[in-house]
Image (tube, rainbow, N blue to C red):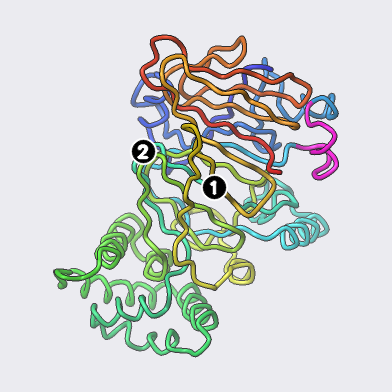
Amino acid sequence: MELLTPALQTYPWGSRTLLADLRGDDSPSATPEAELWFGSHPAAPATIEGVGLDEVIADDPADALGVEVRGRYGDSLPFLLKILAADSPLSIQAHPTSAQARAGFEAENAAGIALDAPERNYKDPNHKPELLVALTPFRALAGLRPAKQTLEFFDYLDCPVLSRYSAMLQSENEEEGLRALFTTWISLPRAKRVEVIDGVRGCVDKRAFSGTPDWMREAARCFVELDEAHPGDVGVLASLLLNFVELAPGEAMYLGAGRLHAYLSGMAVEIMANSDNVLRGGLTTKHVDVPELVRITDFSTLVNPRVPAGVVDGACAFDVPVRDFHLTRYELADGAGFDAVSAGPAIVLCTGGAVDCGPLELTPGTAAWIPACDPDVRVSARDGSDRAEVFYARVGK
C-alpha cells in the first residue's frame, strides 16, 4: 500500500476554489483546477513517489492486479477514479460502447492520427460508462427527456421558431424522432442556429413559468445560462432535449454508453472504466465530430439517471450494470472504520475529515493505492475527526 498522488487537470471549465478548499491549498488557485485523476490512464497517470501508476502496474502486474482481474482485463487497471470540480459547463458529450471504441481506436491508428492530435476521437480502445457521486450540490444535463415532455415544454413556450421542429418529436418511433431533431439542430449553419436560439430565448424571457413543473422551470433556466455562457452554440439548443438533474451531496447518477450529458457545476467523485474517449457536440472549443457523435449516441430516453444507494452499516454502495468498477461511500464517526477487503486492486480516497488507512494518514483529496497482493487493510476515522468521508473503489464482481 502506498500514497497515491493524483494528476491535476487544469481545464478552463474548472474551479479556482473547490479543489483548493478541499485540499487546504491556497484559494483561489492560480489557474482553474478541473479534475484530480487517481488512476493509471497513460494520458495522466497518478504517481507513487514520482513513478506513474501505469509503470508501477507494468513492473509487476501479478502483484498489482491479481489473477482474477488480469484474467478479465489484462495487465491494466480497469477503472479510473476522479474528483471533478466544475465552475462552468462542460461540453455536451457521449461515450462509446466497447465495440465502438475498439473499432474507432483501430481505425484512427490505421489512419496515422497521433494520440495527442486535437482531432483524435478515440484515445484508447475502452468504453467509458461512469458513475458520479456529488460532494457539493451538483447540476447536470443527463440523458434525453421523453419526447412527450419536451413537446409539453415547446407548447408552453409557444415559440414560432420551435413549431417547425415539433413534428419530428411526434413520430411514432420516439428514438428516431429524437435522432432526427438532434441531428437537424447540431447540423444547422451558425446563422440559422443563432436565429433559432434567439427566437427561443425571446419566448423563454416572456414566460413566468408559474404553475409549471419544476423540471420545466429548470430547463428554461439552464437554456438561458448556457445561452449567456456560449451564445450561438449548438449545445444551447441540445439542452432543450436533456433532463436537468440536481444532486445533493451523497446522491449519485450513472451514465452508460451513448448517453448525452453535460456537467454544469459542482464537485463530485467520479468513477468510470479506464478510458478518455469523448465525442463532443457543443459547449466546447475542442474538436467536435458531428457524424461520429450522432452514430454512437443512444437516442432512447432516460427517465431518471439517478442511482439509489444501498445503505448497509453506514456504507452506501451504488449498483451499476458494469463490472469494471464498484464504488462505496463511507461516513465515519470518530474511530469508526471498515476493512478494505478485495481480491483485486483498490483505491481509498478521503474527501472529508481524516482517516488512517493502514499506516497512512489520508486527508481530503488524498488517496491510497492498495495492490492485490496487500493483505486486508483497516480504514478508520482518526481520533478527533468529526466526520470522515471516504470512497472505496475497486473492481466489480
Badge 2 marks a residue whose secondary structure is: loop
Numbered label attached to residue 187? none
Does residue 56 lie above or below 186 as drawn? above
Q: Give me the residue at 36% from left, 88% from top.
A: 164
The residues colored magenta run 64-76
Residue 5 percent location from the top left of the image:
59, 22
- Report the residue at 53% width, 59% height from top: 93
Q: Nearer the viewer, residue 397 or 187?
A: 397
User: Where residue 51 sits: x, y (%)?
Assistant: 71, 20
SS for dot 1:
strand
Q: Which residue is mark 2?
A: 136
Q: Label 2 to label 1, Cα distance in Å?
A: 15 Å
- Residue 103, position in %: x, y? 78, 62
Residue at image point 53% right, 78% down: 179
Residue 373 highlighted magenta (yes or no): no
| Residue lying at 59% horizontally and 58% vertically, measured from the top left | 256
Instruction: From this view, report whether residue 6 is shown above or below residue 220.
Output: above
Q: As shown in the figure, which amino acid type bears the numbered disc 1?
A: Leu
User: Disc 2, disc 1: CB below 8 Å?
Assistant: no
Assign the magenta stretch its main secondary structure.
helix
Q: Residues within 10 Å of mark 1 (few under 14, many from 20)?
A: many
* Snapshot quadrant of residue 287: bottom right
Badge 1 is on which residue? 131
Q: Quadrant of the N terminus?
A: top right
What amino acid is at disc 2?
Thr
Position in image of residue 49 (x %, y %): 67, 15
Q: Is residue 5 above or below residue 231?
A: above
Is 68 included in the stretch rendered in magenta?
A: yes
